[in-house]
Image (spheres, rainbow, N blue to C red):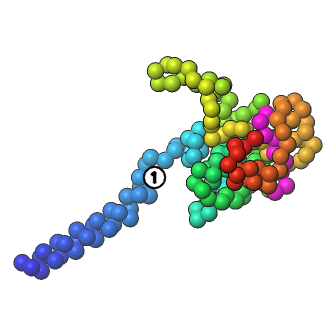
Amino acid sequence: MENRRLWLIGALLVAGVATGVVTPPIWRWWTGPPAGHCPYCLRHEHKESLVKFQADGERVTEACCLSCALNYGRQAHKSVTIVSVTDHESSKPIDPNTAVFVVGSDVSPCTHLHDTMQVGPQREAFPVRWDRCMPNILAFASVRSAEVFRSEHGGRLRSLQDLKQQAASAEPLN
């Protein structure tokens, strides 16, 4: 009788450990965003603004835009390494260290569906004060193409180092 109890306790213990190990990955898979959606803001990923990055202690992952990736690092209090960014013109991956970024133009792939006002659950209007994908940051392979884009759509030219330093500080990206 005592032997049966020990076997039962052992089986329950093994089942509990197995459930604890297997359940979290299954839960993340089940509740994660659908394919083609950013895992951080849950918006559709856009081919002209995708970013691959790695936060400290995590695997390389993809985000919808550079603002989303940098804001994730800021909120998680982790250093973020940008692995690749997507050229806005060609939609091809480029080296983030040689890319030129236009920040705050009137073209915003992630936030183009909302203006400065949102409608709440009770159908009341309220201003958007913060959005993880704002300001929009678009990457370009050359200074010339970034300048042409900026002259048509506004914004400021910035380097990756400037953006990472600003993201690491307490001030908002701009």
Using the image as rendered, state which of residue 125 and residue 115 is in the foreground. 125
**The N terminus: image quadrant:** bottom left
Using the image as rendered, state which of residue 26 and residue 66 is in the foreground. 66
Relative height, residue 1 to residue 51 (above, below) = below
Left or right? Give the position of 47 relative to 159: left
Residue at point 61% right, 25% down?
A: 127
Left or right? Give the position of 113 relative to 19: right
Q: Position of residue 25 (x, y in %)?
A: 44, 58
Query: To which quarter of the image does residue 95 belong?
Result: bottom right
Find out whether residue 97 is within the magenta segment.
yes
Residue bounds of the magenta highlight: 96-105
Q: Position of residue 51 (x, y in %)?
A: 69, 50
Residue at point 58% right, 42% down?
A: 41
Left or right? Give the position of 97 relative to 10: right
Residue at point 90% right, 32% down?
A: 151
Q: Secondary structure at mark 1?
A: helix
| Residue holding disc 1 | 28
Residue lying farthest to the right in this orientation: 144
Chief secondary structure of the magenta span?
A: loop
Q: Position of residue 147 (x, y in %)?
A: 90, 39
Tell me if I can see residue 154 in this picture: yes
